[in-house]
């Protein structure tokens, strides 16, 4: 598994891209985290390189329940009361 990853940075656009090659998400205020699972180890890494695994243990638990043993997911944890 790769040892380094870069978080995606959201960009402002006037239109939503379409087609099979595009995925997009609504940008809410929150924490951008990289979830890295390498077998039994899960880390939640911030854009600043901090490990926030202890701040969000339920995300770590969910990652450990996934059948895939190695992955990296770039996502955002919305703040309580913001977003959906």
Image (tube, grey):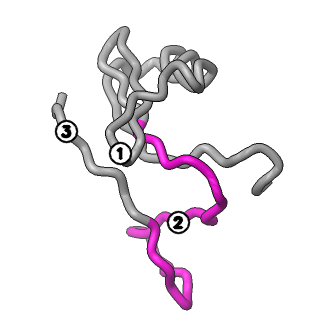
Left or right: 1 in relation to 34: left
Q: Secondary structure at mark 1?
A: loop
Q: Which numbered marker is on residue 48?
A: 1
* Residue corresponding to mark 2: 24
| Mark 3: few/some/many CA within 10 Å (<14, 14-19, 20+) | few
Q: CA distance from mark 3 to mark 1?
A: 13 Å
Residue 80 point in image, percent of width and height:
77, 44
Q: CA distance from mark 3 to mark 2?
A: 23 Å
User: Which region is colored magenta?
Assistant: 10-34
Q: Magenta stretch containing residue 77, yes or no?
A: no
Residue 83 point in image, percent of width and height:
76, 56
Q: Which numbered marker is on residue 59?
A: none
Comparing labels 3 and 1, the label whose residue is closer to the camera: 1
Whether pointer 3 and pointer 1 mark residues with C-beta atoms closer than 8 Å, the reply is: no
Q: CA distance from mark 2 to mark 1?
A: 23 Å
Comparing labels 2 and 1, the label whose residue is closer to the camera: 1
Left or right: 78 in relation to 42: right
Task: Specify the quadrant of the image occupied by residue 58.
Answer: top right
Q: Magenta stretch containing residue 12, yes or no?
A: yes
| Mark 2: few/some/many CA within 10 Å (<14, 14-19, 20+) | few
Q: Earlier in the sequence, mark 2 or mark 1?
A: 2
Residue 37 vertical placement versus 10 (above, below): above
Task: Specify the quadrant of the image occupied by residue 8.
Answer: bottom left
Residue 7 vertical placement versus 45 (above, below): below
Residue visible at 49% across and 48% down in the picture: 32
* Residue corresponding to mark 3: 4
Q: Earlier in the sequence, mark 3 or mark 2?
A: 3
Residue visible at 54% across and 15% down in the picture: 65
| Quadrant in which the N terminus appears | top left
Residue visible at 35% across and 45% down in the picture: 48
Q: Earlier in the sequence, mark 3 or mark 1?
A: 3
């Amino acid at each position: 598994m790769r040892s380094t990853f870069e978080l995606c940075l959201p960009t402002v656009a006037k239109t939503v891209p379409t087609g099979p090659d595009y995925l997009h998400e609504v940008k809410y205020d929150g924490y951008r985290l990289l979830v890295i699972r390498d077998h039994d180890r899960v880390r939640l890494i911030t854009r600043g390189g901090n490990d926030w695994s202890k701040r969000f243990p339920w995300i770590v638990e969910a990652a450990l329940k996934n059948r895939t043993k190695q992955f990296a997911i770039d996502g955002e944890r919305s703040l309580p009361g913001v977003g959906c």
